[in-house]
Structures are given as C-alpha cells and as structure tokens.
Image (cartoon, grey):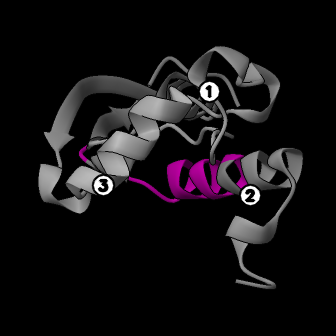
Amino acid sequence: MKGSISDFSKAKYLKFFKDLFSLMREHSKPSTRIAFLNADFRDFQGIPAFDEDPENAILVLEYAKLLENCGWKITHLIDCPLSTERFTGNMVSKMQGKRTLGIIRRTLIIGKPNILHKQ
C-alpha cells in the first residue's frame, strides 16, 4: 500500500524496525518480553529460486540480528506453519514449472532485554 512501511526501500524499512526496536528497548522493564512474528522477505515473485537476488531479501536472521543490535537477547525462534491450503494445486504446478519457492511458515522471534547491552 502506498505510504505504508511495506512500500519503503529495504534500507528505509530496516531503519524503521531499528528505530522501533531501539525505542521499545529504551522503554522496557527487565521483565519485558518481545514477540515478533514475521517471515523471510524474498524478491521472488515469478523468479526461479536459483535466480533470486539475495541483496533484495530480508531473512528472519536479519531481523534477529537487528533485535540483538538494539539491545534484545533472543530467547526463542519458533516456526509457525501456515496452512498449505493457501496454495492451490494449480498454483503449486505453476511454481514447480517456474521453479519458484512458496513460504508456508512464519517465525516467532521472542526476546528479552539484554542487560549487558551498551547503548
């Protein structure tokens, strides 16, 4: 959607989350927990997996590193499967033909304030 964070460039999008995670850490108590549910963002619409440009992707690992850099200690990574019903047989057939990948999970990143983190 125009004007939403999903319309940002990769750099601006990651800066948004860096600022958000830092602000949340700044205003959190030692007993606070953060839960962030997301998935890899991959630039793959209709592109064979082999031809994907990793420079255009944001992997869940990058979100976890960002959280850690903003003062959070990651305590859990939990895969949350999505229903396979989101892909029809016809869609799967087209994806196989084009050799594209489908994402059927989200990852829940759970963390707590890292008391050893230097601002």
Q: Please name the predominant secondary structure of the magenta segment in the image.
A: helix
Marks 1 and 2, Cα distance to the nearest angstrom? 30 Å
Q: Which of 3 and 87 lies nearest the eye of the viewer?
A: 87
Q: Identify residue type, mark 2.
A: Phe
Marks 2 and 3, Cα distance to the nearest angstrom? 37 Å
Q: Which of 117 and 55 lies nearest the eye of the viewer?
A: 55
Q: Which mark is residue 29?
A: none
Is the residue marked by circle 1 packed among few (<14), some (14-19), or many (20+) residues within 10 Å? some
Q: Which mark is residue 90?
A: 3
Which residue is the site of mark 1? 48
The answer to whether residue 57 shows anywhere in this view is: yes
Sequence-wise, the earlier of marks 2 and 3 is: 2
Answer yes or no: do the residues labelled 1 and 2 have beta carbons within 8 Å?
Answer: no
The magenta stretch spans which residues? 18-31
- Quadrant location of the N terminus in the rendered image: bottom right
Q: Residue at x 63, y 58 (%)?
A: 20
